[in-house]
Amino acid sequence: MRTNFLYLYATFAFLALLLSPVSAASTKRDALLDYVSSLQVSDSGFQDTSSGSVTIEATADASMIYLLLGESVDYKNELIYYIQRCQSENGGFSATPGTSPSLEMTFHAIRAIQALELNQSWINGNIDRWKILNYTLAAFNESYEALIFPTSDDLYDFTITELDALYSLIYISSFLETIPSFNVTYVTLSLVNLQYSNGSYSSFDIATRSIKTIFLINDLFGGYFALAPSSSEGAITFINAFKEEEGGYSNTLNGDSTLTSSYQAVSTIKLFTPSYEDPLTSSFVLAKQSQTGGFLSGESPSVKNSWMAISCLFYLDSIGELLAPNIPQTEGFVLLPIINVYAIIALIIIRLKRR
């Protein structure tokens, strides 16, 4: 009899574990915040994944998530101090304190400062804005001198890497309320020229990055140049050609949808369409939330993927969808309907009585 009792007890215990929720978070939003919070190291910044190290980029991505969700980040003073420790003597920022600075990491540092809503007064008193700008210009000029001092009348044929660097330079300059020294006319004409006469571009990545850079330059100069692609309709049509059936975007035609490409597409189209909703794309993004609360690309959730997902939902005016109840997903098995559970228990009891 004791054996039967232990067998029955073990069965109930197993079923209890099977049916217990993976997360105590009541909404998808709560689950995400729990996930991001779990990656914060109290005396520094954020990790991108549970197995990663604290970096300035992950700290910027996490801080942006809190900003978009209207939440206050924990240990804000420690985050600020971590950002300061990532700045080197020449004004640039590095991925982690004590390592070599780069234009890309300086861009992420400015994003973190922006997300933490630190004002210009704080910047002037705690990090040398002129050192940052001088470093940014020097780093850009070192690699892309032809953009600042063109030696040919031919318009520049940008690569993706060059577009990312130019975007970083303009973003940093704009936030520091300064104008970078580069040939604005030459650069903007080159950017606009990347669009073909039929409205298309050489690639999805060239399209999204060049368009976002054009609009950023326009913002930098207060709309003075009224910059835009030659054909806005053609640009939108071209980008939407990379939209897959499930609502996500790929950077190749008929490729696999990713959060990265979906973020690039949505954030670009939003520039043309202030009121922009797409339930299918929103559903694609929401489906990428894992049982940990973080959003994933492939099989691994990360802060970067989560930031891109939340940004998409924000641009699509769908961020309220995160208030839906958090129903944990499962891996390797399916949660059983309660009526099936009762049937299993009844069968166990009948079998035990027959022994």
Image: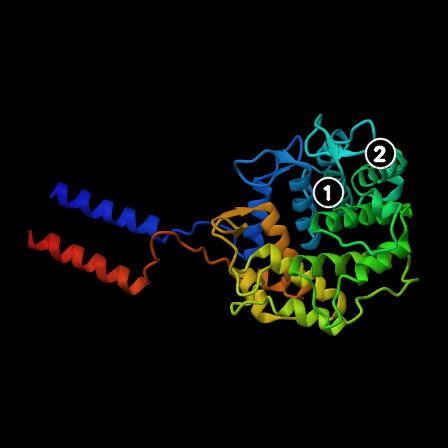
Looking at the picture, does residue 235 appear above or below residue 20? below
Q: Residue at 89%, 62% (x, y): give it.
A: 223
Q: Amino acid at mark 2?
A: Ile
Residue holding disc 1: 108
Amino acid at circle 1:
His
Q: At which x and y percent is residue 197?
A: 76, 71
Kindly tell me whether residue 309 is visible in this rendering.
no
The residue drawn where x is 59% and y is 50% is 305
Q: To which residue does mark 2 refer?
A: 127
Residue 248 lies left or right of residue 154; in this view the side is left
Tell me which numbered mark, 1 or 2, is placed earlier along the sequence.
1
Question: Can I make out residue 10 in this image?
Answer: yes
Q: Position of residue 185 (x, y in %)?
A: 90, 57
Depth check, front residue: 302 or 40? 302
Marks 1 and 2 sit apart, C-alpha to C-alpha, by: 15 Å
Q: Position of residue 123 (x, y in %)?
A: 86, 38
**Which residue is more in the foreground, 235 or 106?**
235
Q: Residues within 10 Å of mark 2 (few under 14, many from 20)?
A: some
Secondary element at tag 1: helix
Which residue corresponds to the image point at 88% horizontal and 36% vertical from the top-left? 134
Q: Residues within 10 Å of mark 1 (few under 14, many from 20)?
A: many
- Quarter where residue 315 is shown: bottom right
Mark 2 element type: loop
